[in-house]
Image (cartoon, helix red, strand yellow):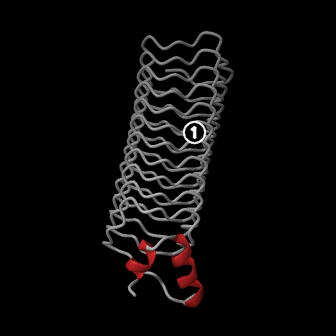
Amino acid sequence: MTQVMTLQRGAIAWSNWRSRYPTLQPDLSDAALSGLDLQSADLRGVDFCRANLTEAILNQSDLSGSKFNKAHLHQAKLIGAKLRQAEFIDANLVEVDFRAADLTEANLIGSDLKGANLSDSDLIRANLIGTELRGARLKQADLMQAELCRADLSNAILLGANLADVNFAGANLFEAELSGTHLYRANFRQAKLVRSHLIGAYLFGADFTDADLSGADLSWANLSKANFAGANLTHTNLRGAILTGAILP
């Protein structure tokens, strides 16, 4: 029986097969797996490159180290999934549900995450360079030290997220919701933060060099030692903000 046929029989059949062949590296690249229920399956290190996993159910599955490069996972469910060091390069992740998933050090460079739900997920040191995150939900997510340069986060919701030491250089954060976020030493060089909401955010040491903050709301934010050299602060709301030691344009 082929690996694809075994997986199509469900998580239990797959787990039994893997226990019999523990050293075999599964190859499911280009497989048609849309709509399959693979909840709680052991899928560590599986090659899903270019596979069709549209609307697949992968909640609580262990997908650590798996590869989904150029795969299609539109509206798939990966709630609570283990995805440490997984690869999603140039993958279609539109409206995928990643709530409470562990994506620590995952590589999502160039992937399409429009409307994805990443709330309460772990994205520590994840590579999200050039990703499409328009309208994505990242409430309470942990993105410490993640790479988001040139990412499109317009209208994204990041309420209460941990964004310490995140690299947003050149990113688009148009009307993004960042109120109450932790942005210690975040890098916003040349980023677009037009009409973004950063009310009460912690931005100690943040770098806004040459950033566009026109119309942004930074009221009551902690901007101590922030660098605004060359930044556009036209109509920016700084009411009640802490600017101790900040470099203003």
**Quarter of the figure that contains the N terminus:** bottom left
Q: Residue at x 54, y 39 (%)?
A: 138
Q: Nearer the viewer, residue 195 or 213?
A: 195
Image spot of residue 146 (x, y percent): 55, 50
Q: Quadrant of residue 172?
A: top left
- Tally of marks: 1
Q: Is residue 95 visible?
A: yes
Q: Nearer the viewer, residue 126 or 150?
A: 126
Label 1, residues with CA under 10 Å away: few <14, some 14-19, many ≥20: many
Q: Nearer the viewer, residue 168 or 93?
A: 93
Q: Nearer the viewer, residue 224 or 160?
A: 160
Q: Quadrant of residue 200?
A: top right
Image spot of residue 71 (x, y percent): 34, 62
Which residue lies under the disc numbered 1?
186
Q: Quadrant of residue 115?
A: top left
Disc 1, SS? loop
Image spot of residue 153 (x, y percent): 42, 36
Q: Is residue 192 above or below residue 200?
A: below
Q: Residue at x 41, y 72 (%)?
A: 8
Image spot of residue 155 (x, y percent): 42, 29
Q: Is residue 27 visible?
A: no
Q: Is residue 27 above or below residue 168?
A: below
Amino acid type at mark 1: Ala
